[in-house]
Amino acid sequence: MNIQENISLKEYNTFGIDVNAKRFVSITSVYQLQQLIKEEKDIFLISGGSNMLLTKDIETLVVHINFKGISIDQQNHNDVYITVNAGENWHEFVLWCVSLNYGGLENLSLIPGNVGTCPIQNIGAYGVEVKDTITKVEAIEIKTGKLVSFSAEECQFGYRNSIFKNKAKGKYILTSVSFKLTKNNHKLNTSYGAIESELSSKGITNPTIKDISDAVIAIRQSKLPDPKEIGNSGSFFKNPVISKEHFEKLQSDFSNIPSYVISDTEIKVPAGWLIEQSGFKGKRFGNYGVHEKQALVLVNYGDASGKEIYELAQKIQHTIKDTFDINLEIEVNIIQ
Ligand code: EPU
């Protein structure tokens, strides 16, 4: 194991925040990790770095999860069961599935990050959540070094949520994720408006898995900044859920407020719309700001600090509270 000293984490987080890791190690096997945590109890994990905002240098050992490998566990005429090691890049894995015509993940194309972190926030886009295909998550329990397994049910998935953000937070290191995908009779999900219009603009009426993946890639590229060009962490906030009563009150002031019905009593409102209404969309403050095409995304144009971006997020939260009486919850992990 090669523990390096004073390494910049700029390349290891999609926000491109330049903080220093006092000590840094890249780990390529579960065994190596088990050995390491016997000696080092206080560690800071980094995987794809796509859902974090670093606001300070990291004094504890930074452990970069870098286990690779994809294996097919079993398959039959209709389904394939696949296990993927945590350090595989998410989008490359999705493209691999698409190329083999394995269905289920095509709507989740082009999401930044690694496979090992996809269950933590139950990544979701265009009508699909990763929980729909996950069968099992394996992890090392930090306290004991033992490899343990969570069934999909045990993961307690919710909207951008799982047990790994709650009861199990900080207790496990996810090492692999297993999926059940379709080989035939794919359950295509094209109901999301933007997918429908992208497909129809190309004259596609009977889409394949690849058509959907291509459509999602085109939509994302038109709306969301590429972290390789402009640092960002995708949606910075969650879409808030409010009471029906509260929604109806807002509707009388803002008749065009978009909404999704969650239950008889609850309504989800897009945070991007709330932020746009508050005048933040496309606003630039020096080296950071709010993305011009999607107000949910905060961006680092250059050498912004995590603290500056966090302060902007708090300013947005206060404005949304004052204008709409809504608490906007931050989706990205703030490291402070
Ligand atoms: N909207 C605005 N202004 C904006 C952005 C959005 O008015 O600047 C309005 C749109 O007009 C639309 C509504 O908000 O009526 C929804 O917008 P969109 O379809 O772009 O989706 P979203 O709710 O903003 C969510 C996810 C995205 C995911 C898309 C597509 C969350 C927090 N975000 O965004 O996820 O790609 O749906 O399914 O749920 C991510 O998590 O990093 C992410 C990008």
Image (spheres, helix red, strand yellow):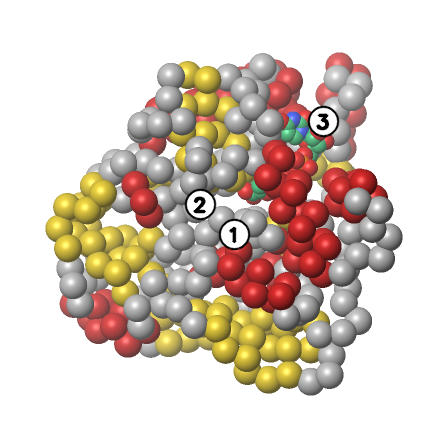
Report the mark closest to the observer, 2 or 1: 2
Reply above or below: 270 against 287.
below
Residue designated by label 1 = 121
Determine the secondary structure under disc 1: loop
Q: Is ligand 1 less than 8 Å from the beta carbon at label 1? A: yes
Q: Residues within 10 Å of mark 1 (few under 14, many from 20)?
A: many
Determine the secondary structure under disc 2: loop
Determine contact: label 2, label 1, CB under 8 Å: yes
Return the x and y of residue 262 as percentages of the image width and height: 74, 43
Left or right side of 8 for 232: right
Return the x and y of residue 275 as percentages of the image width and height: 59, 23
- Looking at this view, name the residue that lies furthest to the front: 202
* Residues at marks 3 and 1, CA–CA distance in whole angstroms: 27 Å
Residue designated by label 3 = 246
Placement of the C terminus among the 4 image quadrants: top left
Q: Is ligand 1 less than 8 Å from the beta carbon at label 2? A: yes
Dividing the picture into quarters, in which one does residue 259 lie?
top right
Return the x and y of residue 191 as percentages of the image width and height: 80, 48
Reply above or below: 134 against 128.
below
Q: How crowded is mark 2: few (under 14 residues within 10 Å), some or many (20 or more)?
A: many
Q: Which amino acid does label 3 sit on?
A: His
Left or right side of 264 for 328: left
Residue designated by label 2 = 51
What residue appears at the point 56 percent right and 65 percent down from the top-left corner? 96
Q: Which amino acid does label 1 sit on?
A: Gln
The disc placed on residue 95 is none
